[in-house]
Amino acid sequence: MAKLVYDGPDGTNEREIDADAIADSGRGGDIRVNLEEDRYLHTPYTGLYWIRTSEDEEKMHYSHV
């Protein structure tokens, strides 16, 4: 699990989600979070406070191929 804290239209938001649901959007400058089937959250890096994962989730990688 991962804790994601970010700025949204209604202020600071906090979500606990599966770490595998977080990825770089590929558009540059933001991340994409798969909230549910066919629902995504796009958050710019500038609006992101932190992403914390549990120790058993290992490291998250944000590299482009």
Image (tube, rainbow, N blue to C red):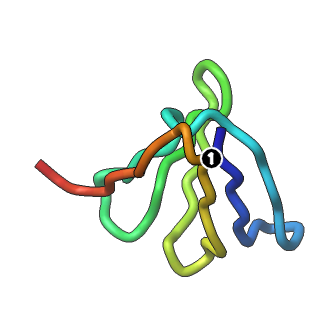
Residue 33 picture location, percent across and down? 56, 43
Residue farthest to the left, as pictured: 65
Determine the residue positioned at 62% across, 58% down. 52
- Looking at the image, residue 54 lies above or below residue 18: below
- Left or right position of 49 against 65: right
Can you tell which quarter of the image residue 27 is in? Answer: bottom left
Residue farthest to the top, as pictured: 37
Determine the residue positioned at 44% across, 64% down. 30
- Looking at the image, residue 37 lies above or below residue 12: above
Give the crowd class for mark 1: few <14, some 14-19, many >=20 residues within 10 Å. few
Residue 19 picture location, percent across and down? 55, 39
- Left or right position of 27 against 10: left
Residue 24 picture location, percent across and down? 37, 52
> Viewer-proximal residue, 23 or 58?
58
Task: Say which element carries label 1.
Answer: loop
Determine the residue positioned at 81% across, 57% down. 14
- Looking at the image, residue 61 lies above or below residue 34: below
Can you tell which quarter of the image residue 16 is in? Answer: top right
> Viewer-proximal residue, 8 or 18?
18
Residue farthest to the front, as pictured: 55
Determine the residue positioned at 45% across, 44% down. 58
- Looking at the image, residue 38 lies above or below residue 32: above
How many numbered callouts?
Answer: 1
Three-letter residue code for mark 1? Ser
Residue farthest to the right, as pictured: 10
Residue denoted by label 1: 54
Quarter of the image with the N terminus in it: top right
Residue 6 picture location, percent across and down? 70, 67
